[in-house]
Amino acid sequence: MVVMKPIRIFRHLVCHHPGYLGEFLQNRGIPWQLVCIDQDHPIPQRTDDVSALVFMGAGVSVNDDLPWVEGELQLILKAFDDDIPVMGICFGAQLMSKALGGVISRGEGMEIGWHPLQQVGEDPDGWLDGLPHQFEAFHWHADTFTLPRESRHILSSECFPHQGFVMGDHIGLQFHLEMTREMIEHWIDRYGSDLLLESACGQTATTILSDLDARLERLHQVSDLIYGKWLERVLARQGVE
């Protein structure tokens, strides 16, 4: 295992564990720990005992009046002030946006299933090096966010233009790179009613599960590249080569 402070990952749903992100870190010997907000774990407000923070998805809105939401917003601000790298995934990206002054709102319908993303603008810091201009990713969300001031927009989709942004060593992603077969099947089983809603960017369970292993293999190739770029920045701050 790499000698460094752990990456702290915040989980908000019992069925939304780190998935492939956990495998990615474990395979590289990177220490990480899980804070299970869904099990009422308190929110550690320290940042001097971690190398980075990750905020996963949730079944609620960032705008909901929940005490732990406010606690995480304050923690994100502290991490930015202390220069601790942050990654936000779906709800986590929305948390990052709101903490930094952005606005979270409902999109037009839900974006669910496999949809293409397009790179936006220039990429001077190489966050998307090695990726094609367009690639497919997994989505399951209704809310969207405005881009934080001083952030750089990097990814877009047809239904939800704001899919990814970066700020220094921080990254927010509206979509899901962490999915596994088990997670997708669990989400369909648990949240299948979402698939019945009329939405231009919704998909049926049959479509989502079609050619699933090949799609996941391609998704994880994208995961390796984007997670890898973020991890390089985390390791550099820890003095690890």
Image (cartoon, rainbow, N blue to C red):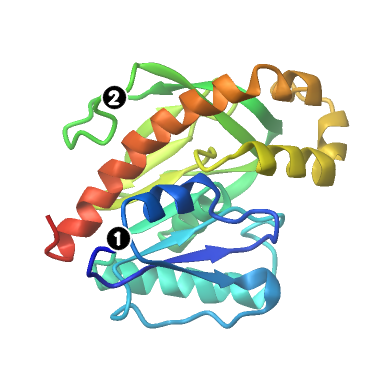
In the image, 118: left or right of 230?
right
- Looking at the rendered structure, the kind of residue marked 1 is Pro
Label 1, secondary structure: give it: loop
* Residue at image coords 81%, 44%: 191
From the viewer's perspective, is 143 left or right of 195? left
Give whichever of 22, 121 is nearer the camera.
Answer: 22
Where is residue 123? Give x, y as percent. 22, 30
Left/right placement of residue 79 relative to residue 94 reads left
Which quarter of the picture shows residue 209?
Answer: top right
Residue found at x 35% / y 66%:
31
* Residue at position x 15%, y 57% in the image: 236
Residue 70, given in percent of the width and then of the height, sits at 56, 73
Label 2, label 1: how many angstroms apart (C-alpha)? 23 Å
Residue drawn 47% across and 53% down? 22
User: Which mark is drawn over residue 128?
Assistant: none
Q: Which residue is mark 1?
A: 85
